[in-house]
Amino acid sequence: MKKIGLLNGPNLDRLGKREPEVYGSVTLDEIEDKVKNKAASCDCEVDAFQSNHEGALIDKIHEWGDVGFSGLILNPGGLTHTSVALRDAVVASGLRSVEVHLSNIHAREDFRHRSLVSGIVDAVVAGMGHHGYMSALRYLSEEG
């Protein structure tokens, strides 16, 4: 059974409360439950983790890479545009990775158009709301 990490960065614990007109009304717990339930039918197991702290996110990526996870679904939140360290952790992990954004970052403020992560992941999903996580799971559950 494939193991896939589901990593959510800063402020994503506020989903359902924070700017629902941009991010939707679905909570992070609901997203995690949906992904885990769908994973079972894809012969995958999903371990979910969220933190507002960059170092905790990096440590979790290292851990998942070291114990042999096969994939990473990553929504770095605001760290998308600022964190070279998070980018480097994804590279060092060796994990097949999909970057997910609830909103279309390219249709928002200029500073959100540039992702430090997009160039090193296998795929990017943006603007599909919580459905983007399911697309990422389907992609990672297939043989690479």
Image: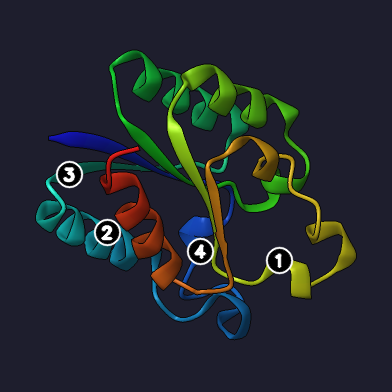
Q: Return the x and y of residue 20 as percentages of the image width and height.
A: 55, 81
Upstream in the sequence, badge 4 or badge 3? 4
The residue wearing badge 4 is 14
The C terminus lies in which quarter of the figure? Answer: top left
Given contact means CB atoms under 8 Å apart, are the residues at marks 3 and 1 in contact?
A: no
Q: Residue at x 69, y 40 (%)?
A: 119
| Amino acid at circle 4 | Arg
Upstream in the sequence, badge 2 or badge 3? 2
- Looking at the rendering, which quadrant does residue 91 occupy? top right
The residue wearing badge 1 is 105
Upstream in the sequence, badge 1 or badge 2? 2
Upstream in the sequence, badge 1 or badge 4? 4
Asked whether 144 or 78 is in front, the reply is: 144
Q: Is residue 6 left or right of residue 56?
A: left
Given contact means CB atoms under 8 Å apart, are the residues at marks 4 and 3 in contact?
A: no
What is the distance, in whole Å, between disc 4 and disc 3 at their CAs?
A: 27 Å
Asked whether 143 or 6 is in front, the reply is: 143
Q: Secondary structure at mark 3?
A: strand
The residue wearing badge 2 is 35
Q: Secondary structure at mark 2?
A: helix
Given contact means CB atoms under 8 Å apart, are the residues at marks 1 and 2 in contact?
A: no
